[in-house]
Image: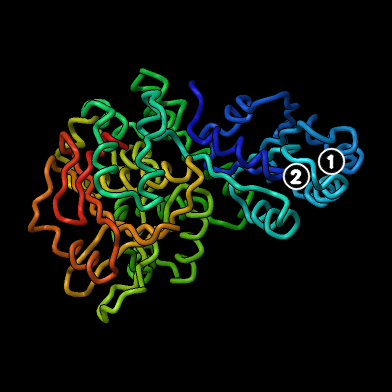
């Protein structure tokens, strides 16, 4: 694999913080990223009994002996190491780039970072591959331009397609987990996704939430695959599964916190009084979604009844991963009114609000953009964005541009 797009941001964090944590879904490439860090690093894997024993027998002594250049993989399995890490950092607070942690999200990891290492640690999320990463392209310049509120002319110049339509559709169907993507064996890819979910349930979830009924939770994840891209109604989900609404809320929090599901809250900063307040959600990896939906191949996906919502989720994830890889914070929301006006994604960042409409077709119908135009005017947005499968970037209005998904 070539360098991940997040590498540059991690290197930036290492120049400013004594410790950096790289979090993300299991099998998204965190261990590989640690091996690509600049300089010499000694790696300790907390899934290895020998490494864990060496680190935890006497954490203070361990960190005195290894005062820098230390990468600790799956750090959530060693929560007792964090207080000693804080002490080690404070011995030489001015020294930067000494420790790197990686791990899947867990209550212990989140708590340790927030309470023990606050102010001492930089945080980055490594998601599965974006389409550009999958096809070994450099990061797009669009993310920096959009985040800075660049003029529409600059966005259009940088928005030409970088992938062929076939490459983009392959990335959409197979998803971004590196191991199945790198394999050309379709049977292996199918088996990998099935076993990934089993491993996630039996290993990660069982360890983090030992009282969780894993069979019922698997049914819940299967239901979520059919709800991906939809407005969520917890009461309806609870009735379908025969559980309580608080249980559904807890299960959604687990899926979101372990990077399997993305919960997108409703936009609530609008003068419109008839806003839908329920959140929206997506299964974050399109390949895993398609396996759960039993979509046979890319051709079958083209006519599948969920292809529009699957495409929307893939584009949402591509955008958020692109901004995240560049170290740009963008908070996602969705917008819908009770009258049916809808915008797929609202991004709120330092340069203001960026509303995004996502279309599977090759060219957006201007008549379908009324809600986007009204939102841009009501919130005085610098730009409204349409992502579609067009062949080239286009200006649709004074403050609305259309970009091909292949440009991302």
Residue 298 percent location from the top left of the image: 22, 31
Residue with the mark numbered 1: 56
Q: Residues within 10 Å of mark 2 (few under 14, many from 20)?
A: some
Residue 199 percent location from the top left of the image: 53, 38
Q: Is residue 67 visible?
A: yes
Alpha-carbon distance for marks 1 and 2? 7 Å
Looking at the image, which is closer to me, 344 or 404?
404
Q: Residue at x 41, y 28 (%)?
A: 138
Q: Residue at x 44, y 32 (%)?
A: 177
Tell me whether circle 1 and circle 2 mark residues in contact (CB < 8 Å).
Answer: yes
State which quarter of the image contains the C terminus: top left
Using the image, tell me which numbered label, if any, was put on residue 81.
none
Q: Residue at x 71, y 57 (%)?
A: 118
Looking at the image, which is closer to me, 193 or 400?
400
Residue with the mark numbered 2: 78
Looking at the image, which is closer to me, 246 or 70?
70
- Secondary structure under tag 2 reads loop
Q: Residue furthest top?
A: 184
Mark 1 and mark 2 lie on one chain; the one further toward the N terminus is 1
- Secondary structure under tag 1 reads helix
Q: Residues within 10 Å of mark 1 (few under 14, many from 20)?
A: some
Left-right relation of 24 to 182: right
Q: Residue at x 8, y 51 (%)?
A: 365
Residue 312 percent location from the top left of the image: 27, 48
């Amino acid at each position: 694999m070539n360098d991940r797009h997040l590498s540059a941001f991690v290197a930036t964090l290492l120049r400013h913080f004594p410790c950096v944590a790289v979090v993300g879904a299991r099998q998204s490439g965190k261990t590989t990223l640690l091996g690509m860090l600049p300089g010499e690093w000694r790696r300790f894997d907390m899934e290895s009994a020998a490494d864990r024993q060496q680190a935890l027998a006497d954490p203070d002594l361990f960190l005195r002996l290894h005062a820098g250049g230390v990468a600790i993989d799956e750090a959530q399995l060693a929560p007792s190491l964090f207080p000693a890490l804080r002490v080690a950092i404070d011995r030489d607070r001015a020294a930067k780039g000494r420790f790197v942690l990686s791990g899947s999200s867990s209550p212990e990891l989140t708590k340790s970072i927030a309470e023990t290492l606050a102010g001492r640690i930089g945080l980055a999320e490594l998601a599965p591959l974006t389409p550009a990463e999958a096809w070994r392209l450099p990061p797009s310049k669009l993310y920096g331009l959009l985040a800075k509120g660049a003029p529409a002319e600059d966005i259009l110049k940088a928005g030409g397609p970088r992938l062929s339509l076939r490459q983009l559709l392959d990335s959409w169907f197979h998803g971004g987990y590196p191991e199945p993507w790198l394999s050309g064996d379709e049977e292996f890819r199918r088996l990998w996704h099935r076993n990934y979910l089993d491993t996630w349930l039996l290993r990660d979830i069982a360890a983090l939430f030992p009282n969780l009924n894993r069979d019922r939770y698997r049914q819940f994840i299967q239901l979520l695959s059919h709800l991906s891209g939809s407005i969520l109604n917890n009461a309806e989900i609870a009735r379908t599964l025969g559980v309580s609404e608080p249980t559904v809320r807890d299960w959604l929090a687990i899926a979101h916190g372990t990077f399997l599901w993305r919960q997108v809250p409703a936009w609530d900063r609008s003068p419109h009084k008839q806003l839908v307040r329920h959140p929206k959600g997506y299964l974050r990896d399109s390949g895993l979604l398609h396996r759960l939906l039993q979509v046979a191949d890319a051709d079958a996906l083209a006519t599948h009844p969920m292809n529009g919502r699957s495409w929307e989720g893939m584009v949402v994830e591509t955008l958020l991963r692109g901004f995240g890889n560049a170290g740009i914070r963008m908070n996602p929301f969705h917008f819908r009114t009770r009258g049916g006006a809808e915008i797929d994604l609202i991004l709120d960042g330092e340069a203001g609000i960026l509303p995004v409409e996502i279309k599977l077709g090759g060219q957006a119908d201007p008549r379908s953009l009324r809600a986007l135009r009204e939102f841009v005017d009501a919130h005085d947005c610098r730009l409204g964005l349409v992502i579609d499968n067009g062949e080239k970037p286009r200006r649709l209005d004074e403050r609305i541009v259309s970009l091909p998904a292949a440009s991302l």
